[in-house]
Image: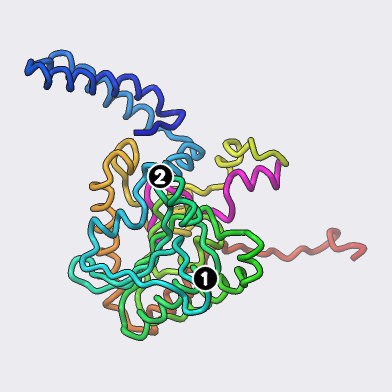
Amino acid sequence: MRYLEFEKPLREIESKIEQLEVYASSRDIDLSHEIQPLKDRLHSMVDEIFSQLTPWQRVQLARHPDRPYTMDYIRNFVEEFVELHGDRMFRDDLAIITGMGSIAGRSVAIVGHQKGRDTDENIRRNFGMPHPEGFRKARRMMEMADRHRLPIVCFIDSPGAFPGLGAEERGQHVAIAENLEIMSKLRVPIVCVVLGEGGSGGALAIGVGNRVLMLENAYYAVCTPEACAAIILKDRTKAATVAGTMRIVPNDLLNLGVIDEVIPEPIGGAHRNPGETAQNVKAGIVRHLDHLCALGEDELIEQRYKRFRDIGVFYEAETTGPALAGI
């Protein structure tokens, strides 16, 4: 297991437990009287560390290299999944996964970002940053789902859309804008789940849902903390400082009405118990689909439209008297 900086106090004690368990097994002896106190201490340390995470630490957990990705959730609870490839215009973008399967007996269409587990796969999948053909592949899948009246489940986990020259030449901005427009008009239920990183237009391009759920240690933002620090403070190294003021972690976003539910993770993060995390995600998806599938087409479109129009509501007050003097 790979450890983040704030997790490093756990590394020594977990290593000691593992060594004792291996030794006890190889010698066929009982060392539980030594192992159990270490496990108790470990649980206490985990509770202490993860009960008071800062926003920046949650961002780090969202990026943890061992964190479950879209295909991990698909393998866990999507039955009879068939992946569909290509945008019928340029090529197959491996940063986006699309396909059809069933969840708890209900047929669904699935769209999701996919990162790689090692350097080679990350290069092939462009570190989960889609090109325009990836968004067009997602649009193709969603339009197919609309024709066949299949609910859509979107898994969001990307630092953002790829900002390279080739992507811009092939219409990155247009591909994102078209997805926003099309998703707003689809006649089927859409449930989106932010699994890790929810970065900018790359996330929103598959994020216009009737319900937006978010794992406990994920973030959802107009830009990364590093980009925000570079823009506001002219210093990318101050990302940890600005992360606390951006309001990009689940509880803040729930209070702002940007998301609809925070899905709990096992103590220590999703990577420490991927199976439990997957079951929590599945339960959330099933619960919301059960409700949304009972709504009519017009209700689904209106609810989705209103949901996003209500984000960022503000009030204007008329200014009268001296303040207007000289205008």
For label 2, the residue is 217
Place of residue 280 in the rendered image (x, y in percent of width and height, measured from the top left): 26, 52
Residue 133 numbered mark, or none = 1
Residue 140 among those drawn in magenta:
no
Badge 1: residue crowd in 10 Å (few <14, some 14–19, many ≥20): many
Magenta stretch, residue numbers: 211-233
Please, is residue 56 above or below residue 101 in the view? above
Frontmost residue, 21 versus 6: 21
Question: Residue placed at 53% from the left, 61% from the top?
Answer: 202
Image mark count: 2
Badge 2: residue crowd in 10 Å (few <14, some 14–19, many ≥20): many
- Amino acid at circle 1: Glu
Place of residue 76 in the rendered image (x, y in percent of width and height, measured from the top left): 23, 55
Spatial distance from mark 2 to mark 1, Cα to Cα? 29 Å
Residue 205 numbered mark, or none = none
- Whichever of labels 2 and 1 marks the residue nearer the N terminus, that label is 1
**Would residue 95 appear left or right of 78 to someone viewing this image?**
right
Q: What SS does tag 1 mark?
A: helix
Residue 212 among those drawn in magenta:
yes
Place of residue 66 in the rendered image (x, y in percent of width and height, measured from the top left): 37, 42
Question: Residue placed at 32% from the left, 28% from the top?
Answer: 46
- Amino acid at circle 2: Asn
Frontmost residue, 10 versus 126: 126
Place of residue 28 in the rendered image (x, y in percent of width and height, measured from the top left): 7, 18
Question: Residue placed at 16% from the left, 17% from the top?
Answer: 23
